[in-house]
Amino acid sequence: MTVLKDPLPDAISTRKKSVIAALIGLSLVIAIVFAVLGKQAGLWGLVPIVLYAALALMSVDVVLATAAALLVAAVMSRTGPLALGEQLATSLGSFVAVIGLIIMLGAGLGRVAQETGAAQLLVKVVMQRVGLSTPTRVQIGIMLSSLILVGALGTLAGANAILAPIVIPVAARMKWRPPAVAAMFHAAGAAGLMTGPFTPPVVTITGAAGISYFDYLLKAGLPVAMVTIVTGFFMARWIQRRVDTEYSAADAGGDDGDVTDNRAARRAAAVFVGVLLAMTVFGIVAKAGYSYALVVMVVTAALTGIAGGKSPKQTLEAIYAGAGRFIWLFILFWLLDPLLTLIGKTGTYDAVFSALQPILPTLSPFLFLAMIVGIGYLHAVPGAAVAQVVLINKLFAPVVASLGIPPAVWAVALLGTSQIDQLGPFPGADMIGQMGLARSNNLKMMLVNGWAIMGTNTVLFLVIFWAFG
């Protein structure tokens, strides 16, 4: 029997493609006009950034959106193919590209920890230490495990994917319901991303704001993470009382996941934690920059693999497998640095600062910082939080300096604007992913959880900004 498809989705897709083509075409026309006139684009130089954000909001692949914006910026700045090639070559050693490489190596380290059994064993140890005798203890164990694992591995989806099959049988036996567990995963994982020493947002924010990890953790990461995880803790309990979906008997009767507990796994787990902790402490004492993370990732991955009984080839293959999933992000960052550089050549950054100059005396630091966080609520660059940090910092760094905003306060604003979009106000990939891992289909409760965390964090941001401004 032939099944007729609803033509509406295809019609929407066709219209969207037409709109996308029109946006790119219009942007190119504007760029060509300024290139022919040979004039500085000024505020018109924001056209590539506006195009970038618009394409991302329309769910265009973020790498393709970056490439389109780069093309427009190249035309507008009258940058020829040879000069563009030089920009791309220079970009490989830029701050932004190094962040992309750190993220790739972090994913490789996570894969090594997973294949040696170190990551799974860490979860088991945490759960056993906390205890499994009451629902509250189980909840604390789940959220603490997620916090540690995401912070160590630097990936929300990847870390909680390791965690879920281990803890769901335990949660099911304690009558925790899937929507509540999904809220636990999301809140604790978000807090882990904000505090882990080498997670993508932390490395990017510390580098952009020019602040040490210790200062970042004390003045930005810990306060925001604490509010996030505490709110998530109580929201999970609130959700638990308002849903009736249960885990199946098969879920409750599971074997707590495939946890390898042998000498090799124990050695790998001990080395993973020990080396990561020791190198992090050394980095803090030595006031190491963001590039130090490259050494940490490589050394920790190599020693964890050896301790877990993996040959050098097997360890490298695990790194390749983990890092390969983030090659798109490295390409994104490789293109992003020339994009920002070429936009600068159009005089845009100076024009933005000049446009704000008349109102700077009346613009308080409080209002400015609140505006920056508000950008995160609008999903300025969906799916590319670290790219959003780079863009915001590049555009508004002169304003930050003129208002005398300390690096720690600026780090709070960057953290808010880059991480808030994973919690709401609309459904996102991170939110849906945590639902899937927890085997929940209750989007309403995930949104309520995200809104609650956004609300409490908004209060925290405003208090911090008010105290400074």
Image: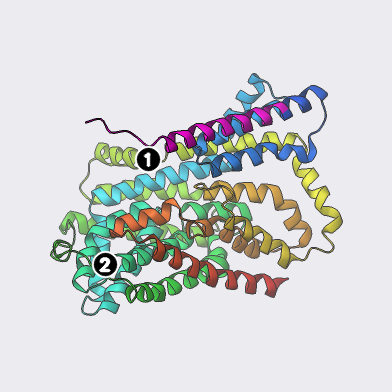
Q: Is residue 400 left or right of residue 205?
A: right
Question: Residue 284 location, x and y as percent?
Answer: 51, 61
Residue 326 at x, y percent in the picture:
41, 41
Which amino acid, mark 1?
Arg
Instruction: Determine the residue positioned at 64% across, 65% down.
Output: 409
Residue 269 visible here: no
Which label's residue is closer to the chain start, 1 or 2?
2
The stretch in magenta equals 1-29
23 part of magenta stretch: yes
The residue under label 2 is 245
- Whether residue 371 appears in this view of the structure is yes
- What SS does tag 2 mark? loop
Residue found at x 68% / y 75% = 467
Few, some or many residues within 10 Å of mark 2 (<14, 14–19, 20+): some
Q: Quadrant of residue 362?
A: bottom right
Q: Nearer the viewer, residue 298 or 456?
A: 456
Quarter occupied by residue 333: top right
Q: Return the residue at label 1.
A: 325
